[in-house]
Amino acid sequence: MDFMELPEAPRLRLTNLRAPACLLGREGDLVTLDLAIADGKLADPTEPADAEVDMGGRMVFPCFTDAHTHIDKGHIWARSPNPDGTFMGALTTVGEDRTARWSAEDVRRRADFSLRSAWAHGTRNLRTHLDSSAPQDDISWAVFRELREDWADCIDLQAVCLVGVDAVDGGAAWKKLSQTVKDSGGVLGTVTYPIPDVAARLDIFFETAGELGLDADFHSDETLDPSSATLREIALAAKRTGYTGMINCGHCCSLSTQDEAEALATLDLCAEVGLSITSLAMCNMYLQDRHAARTPRNRGVTLVHEARERGIPVIFASDNTRDPFYAYGDLDMIEVMREATRIAHLDHSRGDWTEAFLTAPAHACGFEAPSLAAGAPADLVITRARSWTELFARPQTDRIVLRAGRAIDRTLPDYAELDDLMEPA
């Protein structure tokens, strides 16, 4: 029997699988294991089974957590491409598209398309940032609440508000948005950049988050300008205000261009306050150091190795999908794992980097921890690959995804579904 054709049985045993040792609490690389599935959950593999399949050493993972996405922006490239591939080109183009096109129907259809892609690839949990400047906040948060309910049995959804730090002023609009986030079960977020009163605004941010009992998620220092050091300001503000919620900081690109001692001192402070760092390696390599007719030198990938050495949880995630900030991508966490390994040299390194795609993002977002232990949901991604080099050499488009122990239909949505939304404004 081909491993892709798993039999349906009340109790199914899959033998001779391989999984990263760190997911099983062990040292080393890949560990051979057997898994049993009964009643939608993993069961004791030593007990009798109704059917058994030798998996031939194929690699297995729990379904993934994608901790940083933008499903409200996704799939607008065809109508609003980035004119020059730069960060400012993306910022301007998305702003114009949002003003002209982001109705509830438009956001919902594109976001649902993204979620169907993530589902087919094996994502179980997903956190999305939502552009939340008025009046878009009322539109997109209402759509998010509907999508979360619609997808409740498939993907656990979270949302983070996305506004510039200059909007964090304690005024009526800020209080309204913060309450919307609270009422929607969301996460408080902002984009930080070096403005004169950023420290005071971050104090307001953390005081608001603390009062409302909200976790925090930042876009920080998405630039190669070494003078942009708001990651340090975030850590200092968290310490100063005594904030105790979860803190995640995405991008942190300027660490890669700062003086080494300064960057490492910032990471020491981050470790002290217990925040996590998310690298969006694919998107940042697309945007950073892009100049016409010039080969990029600095790629904007943050200091993930140095962060891990300090005990800082490191996460890799998808970020944008087919929009002006990133023209490609499909919310496929195996693609993220493959590209992050190549971009950030995760190979020839520590043996537990798999945690950055599973354990660390789930913990940072408060999702159920991924597990291959008996009693855990039988939500699995099984590939043909038997080793890391096989896994990363091919896109694994023939993987099998099990949800509650049953293979799902992995047919991806057709881009043509969105053609009517791509007409010129």
Image: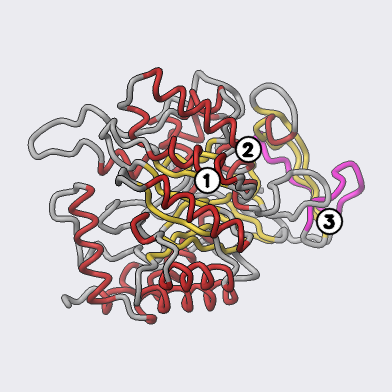
* Rendering coords of residue 164 (x, y %): 35, 57
Query: Would you name the residue on which mark 2 appears?
Result: 58
Q: Which residue lies at the image location 38% right of the left edge and 71% below the top edge?
A: 110
* Rendering coords of residue 144 (x, y %): 49, 72
Q: Is residue 298 left or right of residue 304?
A: left
- CB contact under 8 Å: marks 3 and 1: no
Query: Would you name the residue on which mark 1 appears?
Result: 248
Over which residues does the magenta segment extend? 41-59
Q: Which residue lies at the image location 72% right of the left edge and 40% below the top edge?
A: 54
| Residue 70 inside the magenta-drawn segment | no
Dot 1 crowding, Cα within 10 Å, few <14, some 14–19, many 20+ = many
130, 190: nearer the viewer: 190
Q: CA distance from mark 1 to mark 2?
A: 33 Å
In front: label 1 or label 2: 1
Q: Which residue lies at the image location 30% right of the left edge and 51% below the top edge?
A: 326
| Residue 49 inside the magenta-drawn segment | yes
* Rendering coords of residue 262 (x, y %): 39, 22
Please report whichever mark, 2 or 3, sits nearer to the chain's N-terminal start. Answer: 3
- Amino acid at pointer 1: Asn
